[in-house]
Image (cartoon, rainbow, N blue to C red):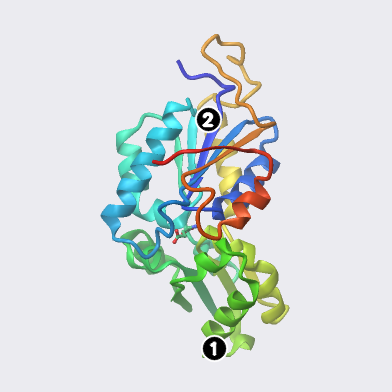
């Protein structure tokens, strides 16, 4: 039986979701989290849809075998590909992420909204529906290759990428930039240097954290709530968060090492 002290599973194709995890931990400090970065199969955003679905299914299986009580898909791409199907398949709360176009729309003053996301996120129905509703003045900007630069902490290359991407636009007429990929949240300081001060930079991390609080509360799954001493409950190691990856040693995935230093529990070849 599910216990309130069981961890919340959080996953992404790599390190992007670690920013989300930080927001979740701030909002819900009494919860345990189990983070999985599917670094072996990253990036998701430029792969065929079926391939991403297969990756996400493997990650879900791994998280469920670790008795998670809820899952946060800390990846806009994986959400767009798989959230609906996962919710139909698994009987636990599954939260996803979407580009923060709705809040950007709410604060728009007639200027444009630049939406940075992976090619996959921007192509799929989920974003198309969001765009149909809140897309007035919004310009979707697919960013193939940008998540890799975040993974490699290639700051100078990322700066050049962003300068080139934004070059065609008069930034004085932009109201907001939406970070529609959890990896890009790590580029916020760079973007702040490039963008005029009045341009808002939005991401979905805090909103997702508040949503998780609501969902856990509604489902009576908050750690420390009734049921915490249930014999089925298991405490996770890792002082509140345990980090796993599918290929921690491969490539230039230095961020996952740095951010998860000393707490990367295990590497699974899934
Ligand atoms: N972090 C992911 C997102 O939010 C995707 C990056 C990728 O794997 O392409 O979309």
Of residues 48 and 106, the one nearer the viewer is 48
Q: Position of residue 156 (x, y in %)?
A: 64, 77
Of residues 129 and 170, the one nearer the viewer is 170
The quadrant the C terminus occupies is top left
Please tell me whether residue 162 is drawn above or below residue 223 in the rendered image. below
User: Mark number for residue 221?
Assistant: none
Answer with left or right where residue 58 lies relative to residue 193.
left
Please tell me whether residue 113 is drawn above or below residue 97 in the rendered image. below
Residue that label 2 marks: 218
Residue that label 1 marks: 169
Q: Is residue 172 visible?
A: yes
Residue 90: quadrant of the picture: top left
SS state under label 1: loop
User: Ligand 1 closer than 8 Å to the CB at disc 2?
Assistant: no
* Residue plotted at (46% across, 73% down): 143
Residue furthest out toward the top: 231
Q: How would you rate the neighbour count of disc 1 (Cα within 10 Å): few for under 14, some for 14-19, many for 20 or more?
A: few
Residue furthest out toward the left: 50
- Please say if the residues under marks 2 and 1 sit with CB atoms less than 8 Å apart: no
SS state under label 2: helix
User: Ligand 1 closer than 8 Å to the CB at disc 1?
Assistant: no
Sequence-earlier tag: 2 or 1: 1
Please tell me whether residue 170 is drawn above or below residue 251 in the rendered image. below
Q: Is residue 109 visible?
A: no
Of residues 169 and 60, the one nearer the viewer is 60
Q: Position of residue 6 (x, y in %)?
A: 55, 24
The quadrant the N terminus occupies is top left
**Marks 2 and 1, how far apart in space?**
44 Å
* Residue plotted at (52% across, 82% down): 165
């Amino acid at each position: 039986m599910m216990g309130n002290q069981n961890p919340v599973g959080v996953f992404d194709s790599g390190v992007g979701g670690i920013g989300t995890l930080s927001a979740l931990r701030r909002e819900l400090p009494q919860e345990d989290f189990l983070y999985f970065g599917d670094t072996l199969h990253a990036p998701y955003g430029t792969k065929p849809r079926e391939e991403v679905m297969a990756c996400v299914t493997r990650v879900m299986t791994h998280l469920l075998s670790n008795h998670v009580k809820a899952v946060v898909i800390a990846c806009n791409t994986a959400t767009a590909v798989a959230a609906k199907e996962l919710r139909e398949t698994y009987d636990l709360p599954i939260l996803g992420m979407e580009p923060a176009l709705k809040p950007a729309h709410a604060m728009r003053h007639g200027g444009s909204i630049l939406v940075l996301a992976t090619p996959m996120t921007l192509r799929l129905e989920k974003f198309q529906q969001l765009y149909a509703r809140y897309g007035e003045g919004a310009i979707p900007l697919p960013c193939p290759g940008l998540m890799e630069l975040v993974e490699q902490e290639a700051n100078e290359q990322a700066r050049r990428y962003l300068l080139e991407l934004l070059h065609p636009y008069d930034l004085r007429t932009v109201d907001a930039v939406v970070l529609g990929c959890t990896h890009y949240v790590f580029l916020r300081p760079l973007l702040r240097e490039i963008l005029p001060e009045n341009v808002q930079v939005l991401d979905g991390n805090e909103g997702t954290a508040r949503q998780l609080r609501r969902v856990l509360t509604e489902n009576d799954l908050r750690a420390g709530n009734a049921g915490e001493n249930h014999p089925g409950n298991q405490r996770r190691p890792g002082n509140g968060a345990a980090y796993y990856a599918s290929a921690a040693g491969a490539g230039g995935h230095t961020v996952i090492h740095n951010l998860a230093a000393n707490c990367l529990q295990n590497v699974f070849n899934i």
